[in-house]
Amino acid sequence: MLPLFDIRVTLRSDGCRMKIADALEARFGETFSRVPRLFRAPGRVNLIGEHTDYNDGFALPAAIDLAVWTAAAPRADRRLHMHSLAMGETFEFDLDAAPAPAANWSDYVRGVALMLERAGYRSEGADLMIDGDLPMGAGLSASAALEVSVAYALTRIAGLDVDRLELAKLCQRAENEFVGARCGVMDQYASCFGVAGRLLLLDCRTLRSKPIPLPASARLVVCDSTARHRIADGEYNRRREECERAVALLSKHIDGIAALRDVTREQLERREGDLPEIVFRRARHVVGENERTLRAAAALEVGDLAECGRLMDLSHASLRDDYEVSCSELDLLARIARGLRGVHGARMMGGGFGGCVICLVEAEAAERVAASLRKSYGEAIGATPSAFCCFPAPGAGPVET
């Protein structure tokens, strides 16, 4: 993942969020002598359903109240001028010239602008100022939030009407084709379609979702392992290739397979001998994770937090052992979390090799669990990690100041 933001996560009140908006608007006015329009796109957590999205499977994400903010105003020419307050960097390029990757955070902006142009959404130039309170590389989808925030800004200030699903797909293409990370669409979808108080049971094949209420007795606690990953550097893409190989081999024996979504556990187990051992284990994770995700959503609908937590624990074990995308820090953090009173389940979240652990927690225990994780895990690593509790938040859109 390319560098985005490196800001310690803290809980934010409505007043704090408005201070972000006011500060961003003021800085934009000082720099460009104009009043901008403001847009925000949230990061996301994923309760369960990891590495299933690019296999046409199921996931259970939710937008969160940490976001990327973009202040934008149109230019008279066809130049895109972008400045990141967090990074203290400015880049500029011509929309009429095919942009080349720069191997920094601006690639997400360049990629979005390019995909919008290719899809026929031609705009004039723009001045953009970007800020955010999402940490980089922590599995909270800062890259997708940046893409969606910029896409909203570019289309709305140009008077273009692009529906949310099309916007999510174009942002995914920017990350796939320009940045070079072959992510699925879950992150962008959750950022666009988040619903307050609801997780989204997302069918990654049909791109339709069902809102799943998070019981009022529950909270989500996220703790940053402080280990950082770079999923665009090979391992993430390698997992996709291994899944594609599994489909190619299984399709010789099972009719109608387009993705691992189409394979049952029984079918996979019968064909274990037809797959290389590592490919079988990758497939076993995906097939099992789809089952776990559907069962976890059903458990939440009837308020069975214990069963949902048990499935989260199984998900972590599968990601660690079969998919091999965990790391020692994530394993330790999840183990500490499971030992705390009020925690129903805990697992690594995101692409892997670092990032956050998400915990399903009794609401009354949420702040205590977050504090215990900071203390216990912090003592183990010799640093103080960020840990916060959250509840599902609305998706992307304009900000009224």
Image (cartoon, grey):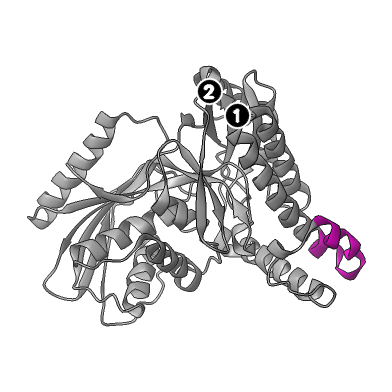
Give the quarter of the image for residue 277: bottom right
Residue 133 shows up from this direction: yes
Give the quarter of the image for residue 151: bottom left
Residue 138 shows up from this direction: no
Give 329 or 276, whichever is nearer the viewer. 276
Give 280 or 164, whichever is nearer the viewer. 164
Q: Amino acid at mark 1?
A: Gly
Q: Which residue is mark 2?
A: 217
Q: Is residue 264 left or right of residue 294?
A: right
Q: What's the residue at 39%, 54% (across, down)?
A: 192
Do the numbered discs 2 and 1 sit on residues whose CB atoms are within 8 Å?
A: yes
Q: Amino acid at mark 2?
A: Ser
Instruction: Specify start and end residues of the magenta stretch as a single range.
Output: 265-280
Q: Which residue is mark 1?
A: 303
Q: What's the residue at 31%, 77% (across, down)?
A: 117
Few, some or many residues within 10 Å of mark 2 (<14, 14–19, 20+): few
Is residue 287 positioned above or below 96 on the image? above
Image quadrant holding the C terminus, namely top left
Is residue 305 positioned above or below 242 on the image? above
